[in-house]
Amino acid sequence: MTEFLDACYEAIRKQETSLSETINAADDDSARFLKDRRLVILTGCGDSYAVADYGRWAFLRVGLNSVAISPLAISQIQLDDSCLVIGVSASGRSNATIDALKTAKSTNATTIVLTDNPKGKATEYADHTWATRSGVESHNISPSSATTTAMVYLLKLAVELQERPDSRISRDLRQLKRVGKKMVNWAEGVGKAISEVVPPKGPLYTISDGSNHVAAQIGMMKFNEYSVVHSFAALREDFRHHHVLSINEGDSAVLVSDSPTNDDDALFFRALVDKLRIRAYHLYTPEDLNLESPLGQTVANSIAFQMAAFHHVMKYDSEKPDWKEPNVNAFDIY
C-alpha cells in the first residue's frame, strides 16, 4: 500500500470517532440562523455538493424551505436578506464555492461556510463558520471523514429545528454518536463484498432515491477518484427509463435502498441480475445498527461506499501513488 492509499484508509477509519466528536462540538445555537428564512441555499463542489444535497433533505424533513445547487448557479437565484446561503467546503479552498459566497454577500444574504478547515480562505467570505471535527490532517486525499462529519453537523441542526424531541432523526443522531466503530466495521465488510462485484473495466452504476441518493453520489465519486472504473450515479427512475438502454452484460451496479427493504427493491434488484444480467449488489443498512430514518442510514451507506472504493483500488491498483495529476490540474478548482 502506498502512503497516499494508507492516508485514505486512515481517514475512513477516523469515522469511528469523528462523527460523535463533531456532533458533540456542533454549536447548538447554530440552528438560529435557519429560522424564519424565506429560503436556505446549500452549495458545494464534489463531495461537498453531496453534503449540500444531504442538508437539503435534512432541512426539508423538518419543514424548512431549502435547495441544493451548484456554486455556478448561485447567480440564478433571487437572493436578499431573508435568505441564507451555506457554502460547504471541507478544505475551505474551493474557488467555485468561494465565488458563490462572494455573490451571496453582495445581495445581503446571510452567508455561512461549513468546513473542516476554519482557517481556509472560504471563511473570509462568510458571515459565520461552522466547523466539523473530521480528525484528518490533510484534505489532499479521497474525502471521507470530512464528508460524513459535515452531514451529521447538518443533521444535528435539523434535529434542533424540529418540534418533536423523540423523532426518528433524533434517535438516529444519538445512535450515530454511539455506533461509530461498529458501523465502520460493518461498512468495511460490505465494502469488501462490493469490491468483489465490480470489475476493473466497464461502467459502475450507483442507484438510489431520496436522501440515499446522496450515498449513491458519494459512491460514484469515490470510485471515480481512484480511477480504476468509471462510475455513474443514477436515480432509480432515470436508470429504469434511460440508463437501462445502454447497459451491457457484465456491467455492474449497486442498488442503495432504505431499510427495511420492500418488494419494489427486490423486484428492481432481480431485474438488474436476471434480466439485464449485470453484476449487482444491494446495499442497505442492517437493523442491528438501529438507524431508523433514511437520513441516518445515508451516513452508514456512504461509509460503505468509501470502503468499497478503497478495497477496489487495493485489489486492482494497490501501488497507486496519488491522483491523476494532469487531470486534477486541468481546471483551476483550488
Image (cartoon, rainbow, N blue to C red):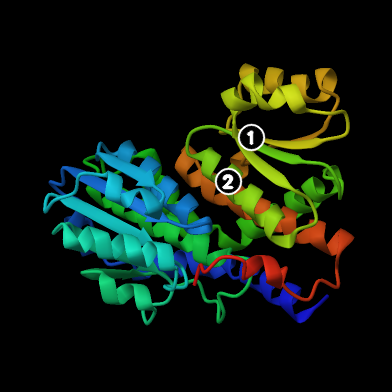
Tell me which amino acid carries mark 1. Answer: Ile
- Tell me what residue is drawn at x 81 percent, y 50 percent: 195
Q: Position of residue 178 (x, y in %)?
A: 50, 59
- Could you tell whether 27 is left or right of 275 in the image? left
Q: Nearer the viewer, residue 10 or 81?
A: 81
- Tell me what residue is drawn at x 53 percent, y 50 percent: 299
Give the quadrant of residue 216.
top right
Give the quadrant of residue 231.
top right
- Tell me what residue is drawn at x 64 percent, y 68 percent: 328
Total numbered labels: 2
Q: Are marks 2 and 1 in contact (CB under 8 Å)?
A: no
Q: Would you name the residue on which mark 2 appears? A: 217
Mark 2 Cα-neighbour bin, 10 Å: few <14, some 14–19, many ≥20: many
Gap between marks 2 and 1 measured at Cα? 9 Å
- Could you tell whether 297 is left or right of 69 in the image? right
Q: Is residue 292 above or below residue 120?
A: above
Q: Judge whether residue 269 can be spotted in this image.
A: no
SS for callout 2: helix
Q: Nearer the viewer, residue 149 or 201?
A: 201
- Could you tell whether 38 is left or right of 146 in the image? left
Tell me which amino acid carries mark 2. Answer: Gln
Mark 1 Cα-neighbour bin, 10 Å: few <14, some 14–19, many ≥20: many
Q: Which quadrant of the rendered structure holds the N terminus? A: bottom right
Q: Nearer the viewer, residue 315 or 89?
A: 89
Q: Would you name the residue on which mark 1 appears? A: 207
- Could you tell whether 7 is left or right of 172 in the image? right
SS for callout 1: strand
Q: Position of residue 70 (x, y in %)?
A: 41, 50
Q: Position of residue 146 (x, y in %)?
A: 51, 66
N-term mark: 2 or 1:
1
Q: Position of residue 31 (x, y in %)?
A: 22, 56
Q: Is residue 27 above or below residue 207?
A: below
